[in-house]
């Protein structure tokens, strides 16, 4: 193992080692010596409460927000809106979908609690003229609000922003129990390209999730965490949106999880309540679209209150843990069929609450961005997918799932739930697999999932 020099501006210290076939990089604590403080106190908190999806912010109803190379900020209240309790003391974090609409220049959007420091990172990466959504789990800040920062490094421009609330995580001050998050090794539960055929306009795809794969067939499973990929390439495709719901809607939904242009392939992570039929339902607004559904976790009600397992605790603000474009991370893109392990052990040890280490963790949640796709001697590199999964102990066969789908010339973000794996002496590893070409990837952590 060799130590990489610490960058003066880096948030993290990183060490790297190379094995025979798989590179192992270690994600370290904050290089400044400060911990990534988790929010509030635990108590009975960290449990999830779904709400009927609601739009709490739409800049199209007012002046168009401007963008700038150095960034422009918007304050968006969320506490007390869309089914989220009005008391900030009861709200640990919110689960939101943020969509950048009609941007006039390329750039990115970051999100943090109002009044919290900006540690860098991004949630949405966009190019001119393309509508891009992504999900986020964020701790509200001062006034129960979020701060959104629009940055267009190359030019001054403008973009609209939409914010939809899908649920929230409670503190110990809230009197009603919620559900715990159980991360699983990701698996594919639906792919309409295999037999069923694309989802037609104005119709829904029912996907049975209770009893599928590692999800128990139990009424206590009240929700699932899925990576929803729209493959908008079949004949008859057109610009559309997909909505993930507990039941097929009687009318077009007012909110969306994923916006797609004709011919586009795009993913989004969604936390979806499970319906009375044990299924979730994917609604397609227009045209003809194929849909892929990969499960990475489920929400379980009725967990023993004394257990820590499955409680979600947000960091005080998102922090960048990985950026393979930079020397501190080896300046090494991931090649075709390439695998790379990252050890999060030092990061896990560094997460603190009220000055004390928060303890055992099963997973980390954050924004995963794939970027810089180019060809290599074994592939044209025109398009690819990136899969992220727990590092296996034995022989590796990457699961047939995708975390991000990437086309050359684009930066594609997606919220990701990364369950840890690996050997007994290093049980906090995550493996990254790239199918074609060469790409770089970034990861900005925003929350952790506790374990007993």
Image: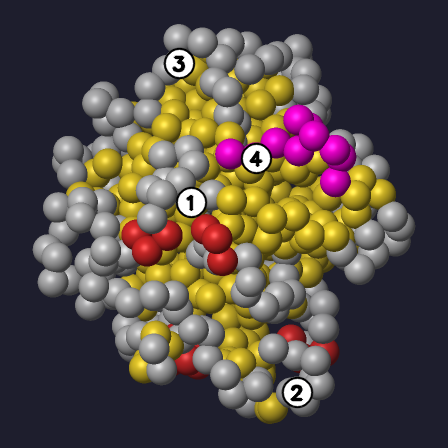
Is the C-beta separation of discs 1 and 4 under 8 Å? no
Residue at horizontal 61 percent and vertical 77 percent from the top: 11
Residue 296 visible (yes or no) = yes
Which region shows up in magenta?
Answer: 56-65
The N terminus is located in which quarter? bottom right
Judge depth for marks 2 and 1 and give the one in front: 1
- Residue 79 circle label: 1
Give the structural element (helix, strand or loop) at label 1.
loop
Which sits earlier in the primary sequence, circle 3 or circle 1?
A: 1
Decide which of 20, 367 is in the foreground and name it.
367
Circle nearer the viewer, 3 or 4: 4
User: Measured along the vertical axis of the image, is residue 61 above or below residue 170?
Assistant: above
Distance (Cα) linking label 1 and label 4: 12 Å
Camera-nearest residue between 432 and 98: 98
The image shows residue 350, relative to residue 432, as above or below, that is: below
Marks 2 and 4 in Cβ contact (< 8 Å): no
Q: For the view shown, which residue lies furthest in the right direction?
A: 155
Q: Name the residue under label 2.
A: 6
Q: From the image, state whether disc 3 or disc 1 is nearer to you.
A: 1
Q: Where is residue 294 in the image (x, y as percent from the top left)?
A: 42, 39
First in sequence, mark 1 or 4: give its number. 4
Q: Who's the residue at 64% across and 75% down the image?
A: 329
Residue marked by disc 4? 57
Quadrant housing the C terminus: bottom left
What number is the disc on residue 326? none
Magenta stretch: residue 339 in it?
A: no
Q: Which residue matches tag 3?
A: 249
Tell me if mark 1 has few (under 14), some (14-19) or many (20+) residues whose alpha carbon lies within 10 angstroms of its own: many
The answer to which of marks 2 and 3 sits earlier in the sequence is 2
Camera-side mark, 2 or 4: 4
- Between residue 385 and residue 313, name the one nearer to us: 313
Left or right: 312 with respect to 108? left
């Amino acid at each position: 193992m060799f130590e990489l020099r610490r960058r003066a501006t880096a948030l993290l210290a990183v060490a790297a080692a190379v094995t025979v076939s798989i590179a192992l990089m270690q994600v370290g604590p904050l290089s400044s010596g400060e911990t990534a403080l988790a929010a509030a106190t635990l108590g009975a908190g960290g449990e999830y409460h779904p709400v009927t999806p609601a739009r709490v912010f739409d800049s199209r109803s007012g002046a168009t927000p401007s963008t700038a190379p150095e960034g422009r900020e918007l304050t968006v209240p969320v506490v007390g809106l869309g089914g989220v309790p009005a008391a900030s003391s009861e709200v640990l974090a919110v689960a939101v979908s943020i969509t950048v609409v009609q941007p006039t220049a390329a750039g990115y959007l970051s999100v943090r609690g109002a009044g919290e420091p900006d540690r860098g990172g991004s949630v949405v990466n966009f190019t001119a003229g393309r509508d891009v959504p992504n999900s986020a789990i964020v701790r509200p800040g001062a006034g129960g609000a979020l701060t959104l920062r629009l940055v267009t490094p190359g030019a001054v421009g403008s973009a609209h922003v939409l914010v939809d609330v899908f649920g929230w995580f409670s503190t110990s001050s809230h009197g009603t129990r919620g559900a715990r998050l159980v991360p699983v090794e990701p698996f594919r539960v639906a792919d309409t390209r295999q037999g069923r055929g694309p989802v037609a306009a104005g119709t829904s795809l029912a996907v049975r999730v209770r009893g599928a794969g590692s999800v128990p067939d139990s009424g206590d499973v009240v929700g699932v965490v899925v990576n929803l990929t729209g493959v908008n390439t079949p004949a008859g495709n057109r610009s559309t949106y997909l909505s993930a719901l507990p039941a097929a809607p009687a009318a077009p939904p007012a909110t969306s999880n994923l916006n797609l242009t004709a011919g586009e392939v795009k993913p989004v992570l969604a936390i979806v309540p499970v319906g009375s039929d044990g299924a979730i339902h994917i609604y397609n607004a227009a045209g003809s679209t194929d849909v892929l559904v990969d499960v990475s976790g489920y929400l379980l009600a009725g967990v023993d209150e004394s257990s820590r397992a499955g409680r979600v605790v947000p960091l005080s603000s998102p922090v960048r843990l990985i950026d393979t474009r930079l020397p501190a991370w080896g300046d090494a893109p991931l090649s075709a069929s390439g695998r790379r392990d990252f050890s999060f052990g030092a990061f896990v040890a560094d997460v603190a609450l009220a000055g004390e280490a928060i303890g055992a963790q099963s997973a980390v949640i954050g924004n995963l961005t794939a970027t810089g796709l180019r060809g290599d001697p074994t592939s044209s590199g025109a398009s690819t997918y990136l899969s992220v999964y727990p590092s296996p102990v034995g022989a590796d066969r990457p699961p047939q799932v995708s975390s991000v789908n990437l086309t050359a010339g684009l930066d594609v973000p997606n919220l990701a739930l990364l369950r840890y794996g690996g050997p007994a002496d290093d049980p906090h590893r995550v493996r990254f697999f790239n199918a074609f070409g060469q790409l770089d990837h970034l990861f900005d952590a925003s929350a952790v999932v506790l374990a007993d």
